[in-house]
Image (cartoon, helix red, strand yellow):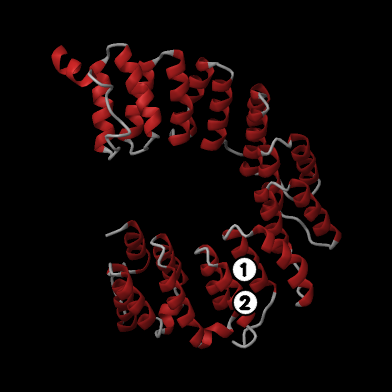
Amino acid sequence: MSSFTRLLYRSFCTSPATTSPSSTSLNTLLQGVVKERSFKKLVEKFKKSSETYRFRCRPRVYEITVRRLADAKKFQYIEEILEEQKKYSDISKEGFAVRIISLYGKSGMFDHASKTFDQLPELKCPRTVMAFNALLTASIDCKNFDEADRIFRELQPSLSISPNNFTYNIMIRAFCEMGRFDSALRMLDEMEKNGVEPNMITFNTLLKALYEGDRFSDGEKIWAKMENTTCVPDNKSFNAKLEGLIRGGKTLEAVELVKELRSRGLKPDMYSFNSLIKGFCNEGDLEEAMRIYDDLANNDCTPNRTTIQTIVPFLCKKGDFDLAFSLCKDSLSRHCLLDAGVLQAVVDGLVKESKLDEAKELVNLGREKRYSRSFLKLPTGAEDAAEDAK
């Protein structure tokens, strides 16, 4: 059973101790979709199950099924499933219609999302700002950023739709993803000019983009603007600023920012600590980077892929292959997989220091985790040398 079908099964098909006949029937339909491995039969079963109203009330089963088909690039089947939904009276409800538009967007099928939006009047479904926002989001999900700009500027006035903060947040996100930071900032000004109040999503979207985009001074202006509203900086805000400080080589200021974060009653998370570790590694301060690493458990944090892949290359550069080996081994044992190139660098270093047993152990552990032999291997002759040493 694939990860998708396992997720579906857990989400929808676990029955309580007592079930009514109708719930049993619904579970039967859901299980039929979950367990079907043939895409063609899956579509047939999904369409048949859609005849049941209670099945159509399960948006999650739609999302996971469509994602499964999209990953397999079965776009014709996605169209078959979603177009089928338009024959039901549910389509006259904007929430149901928005689901169809959103699913087309998440599948990269923007033309179908746009066509569905255009069809709403004939389907007796109102086109309010909710559907408009779904269409905008679909264009961004499809990386069709210019189309999002056109829709916002041209379609919104023609439909007499007043944008809300969700609309502006979508557009700010679009401009940030395009790297058009000045346009994103102008969108904030327009938002406030039209009496729409920015929220935490607005500010955090801008902060993340500006700090990561080397626009630190602009990020500071947005931070100051946020402080003058009812929005209070949260972990995402602080982590965005941390990233900006680290990118600017201001690691000590980043340390002070974490102290400020704590003083406001917030708790640094793994992203916060990874930023500090990255900063100290960039500065060549292995001792301080490892001090933070060793203190993670005291902060209820567990090293993740980013943590290890930040420290290990630095350890290799410093020639500390024993510690690099230990960190990699611990990571793999926790099913935290690393880039094969990172592991290979440690293997090569261990071999150069004649630590063949450790090198072979790491290769074998990597292969247990299904790393390809072509990407993770002992250098030529090292495996024979390891056997000779025994």
Determine whether 153 is above or below 367 in the image. Answer: below
Task: Say what secondary structure mark 1 lies in.
Answer: helix
User: CB under 8 Å between callouts 2 and 1?
Assistant: yes
Task: Say what secondary structure mark 2 lies in.
Answer: helix
**Sequence-first disc among 2 and 1:** 2
Determine whether 213 is above or below 65 in the image. Answer: above
Is residue 312 visible to the viewer in this orientation of the structure?
yes
Q: In which quarter of the image is the C terminus?
A: top left
Q: Which mark is residue 117?
A: 2
Find the residue positioned furthest to the right.
Answer: 193
Which of the 4 image quarters holds residue 31? Answer: bottom left
Q: In this view, does 146 lie to the left or right of 59?
A: right
Residue at screen point 54% across, 77% down: 96
Q: In this view, does 247 lie to the left or right of 52?
A: right
Query: Residue beneath label 1, please?
Result: 134
Judge depth for marks 2 and 1 and give the one in front.
Answer: 2
